[in-house]
C-alpha cells in the first residue's frame, strides 16, 4: 500500500515539474544559440514560457488545495502588457 502511494506521489510531482522542465529547456536552447550578452525572444516564445508557468501554478494550487493549504486562496491575475 505504501509503495503505491509513493509511486502515485512521484508521478504527480513529475507531472507538475514537467512544465518547469519545458521552460528550462527553452531558455537553455536560447542561451546556447545566442552568443551575445543580450537575448532576444519572440512573442511566441515568451507566451509559451508564461503559459507553462501558469499551468504549473494552477496545478500546484489545485493539488495543495485538496490538502487544505493556504495556496488554494491564491489567484493568478493577468497583467496588461505594455506595447511600445
Image: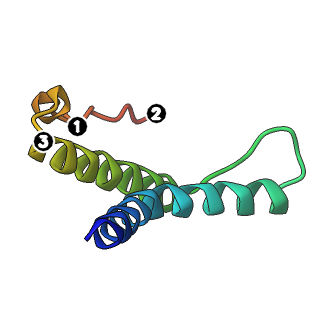
Category of crowding for the residue at label 2, using alpha-carbon neighbours closer than 10 angstroms: few (below 14), some (14–19), many (at least 20):
few
| Label 1 vs label 2, nearer the camera | 1
Category of crowding for the residue at label 3, using alpha-carbon neighbours closer than 10 angstroms: few (below 14), some (14–19), many (at least 20):
some
Label annotation for residue 49:
none
Q: Would you name the residue on which mark 2 appears?
A: 84
Measured from the top left, where is residue 72 in percent x and y?
13, 35
Q: Secondary structure at mark 1?
A: loop
- Front residue of 56 and 2: 2
Q: Would you name the residue on which mark 1 appears?
A: 78
Tell me whether the residue at label 2 lies in contact with that at label 3, contact meaning CB atoms closer than 8 angstroms.
Answer: no
Measured from the top left, where is residue 20 in percent x and y?
49, 55
| Label 1 vs label 3, nearer the camera | 3
Q: Secondary structure at mark 2?
A: loop
Category of crowding for the residue at label 1, using alpha-carbon neighbours closer than 10 angstroms: few (below 14), some (14–19), many (at least 20):
few
- Up-down relation of residue 65 to residue 1 (above or below): above
Q: CA distance from mark 1 to mark 2?
A: 19 Å
**41 sits left or right of 83 in the view:** right
Q: CA distance from mark 1 to mark 3?
A: 21 Å
Which residue, as the protein is rendered here, is positioned at the far right? 35
Identify the residue at image location x=34%, y=35%: 81
Identify the residue at image location x=27%, y=33%: 80
- Up-down relation of residue 7 to residue 43 (above or below): below
Q: Secondary structure at mark 3?
A: helix
Identify the residue at image location x=86%, y=38%: 37
Measured from the top left, where is residue 50 in percent x and y?
40, 49
Q: Which callout, 1 or 2, points at the residue further toward the start of the chain?
A: 1
Amino acid at each position: 500500500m505504501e509503495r503505491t502511494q509513493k509511486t502515485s506521489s512521484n508521478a504527480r510531482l513529475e507531472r507538475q515539474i514537467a512544465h518547469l522542465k519545458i521552460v528550462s529547456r527553452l531558455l537553455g536552447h536560447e542561451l546556447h544559440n545566442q552568443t551575445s550578452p543580450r537575448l532576444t525572444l519572440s512573442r511566441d516564445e515568451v507566451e509559451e514560457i508564461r503559459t507553462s508557468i501558469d499551468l504549473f501554478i494552477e496545478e500546484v494550487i489545485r493539488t495543495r488545495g485538496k490538502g487544505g493549504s493556504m495556496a488554494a486562496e491564491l489567484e493568478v491575475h493577468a497583467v496588461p502588457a505594455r506595447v511600445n
